[in-house]
Amino acid sequence: MEVLISEEKILARVGELGRQIDADYQGLPLTIVAVLTGSLILLADLIRRIHLPHRVGLVQASSYKGATTERGTLLINEALAPDVGGRHVLLLDDIFDTGHTLSALAPHLLDRGALSVRTAVLLRKLGRQEVAMEPDYVGFEIPDAFVVGYGLDYDDDYRHLPHIAVLDPGRAAPRSEG
Ligand code: 5GP
Ligand code: MG
Ligand code: MG
């Protein structure tokens, strides 16, 4: 597998994002809400580079491919839903691809009482966006290829890789969930 972004580059960029978040949220009650499962490694690295006091929550969402709709509806696991009332939320995901996941989750968190919702992603895939929303913090922009590692999976494998790699061409890659 071809390495697209090395571990060193990822960690340096995550440090920069942490400093930016520190500056932007000074004095505000911040809760980082991470989308399972792909953002777990990013979450662990990023929160140790944010020095402001903050809380952490998790959200699980999966796209359900309905027979009648072209793109699936997002199913949100309410059992995990963090209490974000009175909190400024930074919604964290591994990658912004079409944008449907984050653009559906953001209003949901506002409905649950968040004071504001911004989004942060390690990766943004170019040329795939289908929503009007722009992610607020982006680690790296990448070409339209299926990537794994640093939390991102292919069929639940490869999450443990310390770098971002392009999955071997020729393997069919599902884009729908997780
Ligand atoms: P979106 O809703 O922005 O289209 O996509 C969100 C989800 O699709 C991401 O959280 C991720 O789970 C998955 N995804 C999109 N592109 C890739 C990719 O290149 N590699 C992996 N492993 N997952 C992807
Ligand atoms: Mg996945
Ligand atoms: Mg995901």
Image: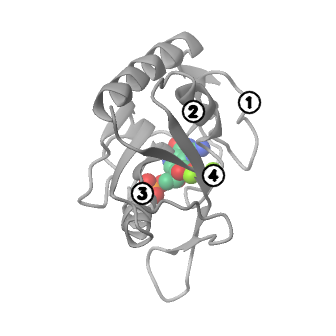
Q: Nearer the viewer, mark 3 or mark 1?
A: 3
User: How many residues crowd mark 1 within 10 Å: few (<14), some (14–19), many (20+)?
Assistant: few
Furthest residue in direction top, as rendered: 8
Front-most of 62 and 175?
62
Q: Which residue is mark 3?
A: 102
Residue 36, numbered label? 4
Compute the Cα span from label 2 to label 3. 16 Å
User: SS at mark 4?
Assistant: loop
Residue 33 picture location, percent across and down: 52, 50
Q: Residue at x 58, y 60 (%)?
A: 82
Mark 1 or 4, closer to the camera: 4
Give the left or right position of residue 171, taking residue 93 as reference. right
Up-down: is 111 above or below 4? below
Dot 2 or dot 3, earlier in sequence: 2
Q: Residues within 10 Å of mark 4 (few under 14, many from 20)?
A: some
Q: Most extreme residue toward the bottom, as rendered?
A: 68
| Circles 2 and 4: CB atoms closer than 8 Å | no
- Above or below, 85 relative to 24: below
Which of the 4 image quadrants contains residue 3? Answer: top right
Q: Secondary structure at mark 2?
A: helix
Measured as percent of width and height from the top left, residue 107 is found at 36, 67
Amino acid type assigned to the residue bearing label 4 in the image: Leu
Image location of residue 69, percent across then percent down:
45, 83
Q: What amino acid is at disc 1?
A: His
Q: Is residue 116 visible?
A: yes
